[in-house]
Image (cartoon, grey):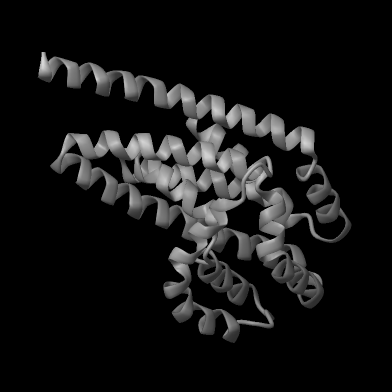
Amino acid sequence: MTLSAAFLFGLMGGAHCIGMCGGIMSTLSLASGRNVWLNLIAYNSGRIFSYSVAGALVALLGSLLSDQLLSIGVALRIFASIMLILMALYIANWWKGLTQVEKLGRYLWRYLQPIASKLMPVRTTSQALTLGLVWGWLPCGLVYSVLIWSMSSGSSLQGALIMLCFGLGTLPAMILTGRLAYQMKQLSQSKLLRSLAALIIISFAIWQLVPLITSTVTHTEHIHG
């Protein structure tokens, strides 16, 4: 259920992905010639691999913190559930404050952007793969939100899988360039569809949040009792 939800986040975040990476997709499509599909797959494989590595790293950090103090683990899971709700609000276009999270990664991107610039225009599949590996660290509020969720997953493997499924969810919008990408963007921007997806995500977040809050309250009452 968790991995399915991660895939849904990526799928419904397709419009945002087109805005962030659509220019590169168009460039790859125009410049790749006969290798267009191979280069598109290489780029996106690199991008999703970077997501998975980031997911494994933050999950490892979250696991280490939780081992030191149990309450930190509970706090991380509660925070992650709240972030899921904020993601749902973003997907439904009910609140866009999540984009402010992107500012957190601008310092790192200063060092990576020159590398990405040197890889363009893309002429080979290895260039496309390397560009994807670098571009996977582009500051993105949606990606950072899923990373916070991954951080509370409890293991590096689970964190990597959450980010992997999220990345796979973004593939339809990223791979289907040109006319198909436009249609995908129009579909993902459907008010009804986005609202429905947001309600599903909020329900999933509450499903995770309620037991955590209940157990925390019970534990507190037990201590003071």
From what the image shows, is residue 170 above or below residue 44?
above
Residue 15 % position (x, y) = 72, 52
Number of disc labels: 0
Q: Is residue 137 left or right of residue 32?
A: left
Corner quadrant of residue 122: bottom right
Camera-side residue: 125 or 46?
46
Task: Check the picture and name the quadrant holding the C terminus.
Answer: top left
Corner quadrant of residue 10: top right
Camera-side residue: 179 or 190?
190
Residue 33 % position (x, y) = 81, 74
Is residue 93 visible from the viewing direction of this image? yes
Q: Is residue 195 left or right of residue 161?
A: right
Camera-side residue: 117 or 71?
71
Residue 65 % position (x, y) = 21, 46
Q: Is residue 39 left or right of residue 111?
A: right
Residue at left offset 54%, top offset 73%: 130
In this view, which residue lies farthest toward the front? 224
Is residue 1 visible from the viewing direction of this image? no
Residue at left offset 73%, top offset 72%: 28
Residue at left offset 49%, top offset 29%: 205
Residue at left offset 52%, top offset 53%: 143
Residue 102 % position (x, y) = 51, 62
In this view, which residue lies farthest toward the right? 179
